[in-house]
Amino acid sequence: MATPSGSLNDQILANRQQTWNGLGRLLFWGTIYALVLALVTTLHVVNGPSVGLGIFSFLGVVGGFIVVVAAVSRK
């Protein structure tokens, strides 16, 4: 069985850095997604509901969610 390189403290530090890196990505892309949702909500309030805006909103929400999941899950 191969032993990982570095001491236990080095492994713990690397794990923490990886965790904070993932959390930072989640906060960044989550903020962008929240801005997209705020824009969609504002457009609905200003323009009222319509089919065209509904389609754009649906695509924006689903597309934004996919982008956030893809960006956060990449290594």
Image: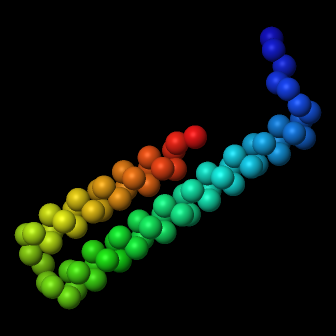
Percent coordinates x, y for residue 19 in the rendering: 68, 49
Which of the 4 image quadrants contains residue 60?
bottom left
Residue at horizontal 92 percent and vertical 33 percent from the top: 7
Picture coordinates of residue 32, whole percent (x, y) = 44, 67
Residue lying at 39% horizontally and 53% vertically, measured from the top left: 67
Q: In which quarter of the image is residue 49?
A: bottom left
Query: Number of callouts in the render?
Result: 0
Task: Tell me if 35 is positioned left or right of 59 in this view.
Answer: right
Give the x, y percent position of residue 21. Answer: 66, 52
> Is residue 73 left or right of 59 when viewed as pictured?
right
Residue farthest left in this picture: 51
Which quadrant does the C terminus fall into? top right
The part of the image, by quadrant, that contains residue 12 is: top right
Please state, as top left, top right, bottom left or bottom right, where the N terminus lies in the image: top right
Q: Where 61 falls versus 53 (above or below)?
A: above
Coloration of the structure image: rainbow
Front position in the image: 56 or 8: 56
Q: In this view, does 68 lie to the left or right of 11?
A: left
Q: Residue furthest top?
A: 1
**Residue displayed at 61% across by 51% down:** 22
| In the displayed structure image, the side of residue 53 where residue 15 appears, left or right | right
Q: Which residue is drawn at 76% across and 48% down?
A: 16
Q: Where is residue 35 in the image (x, y as percent from the top left)?
A: 40, 73
Where 54 sits versus 18, above or below? Answer: below
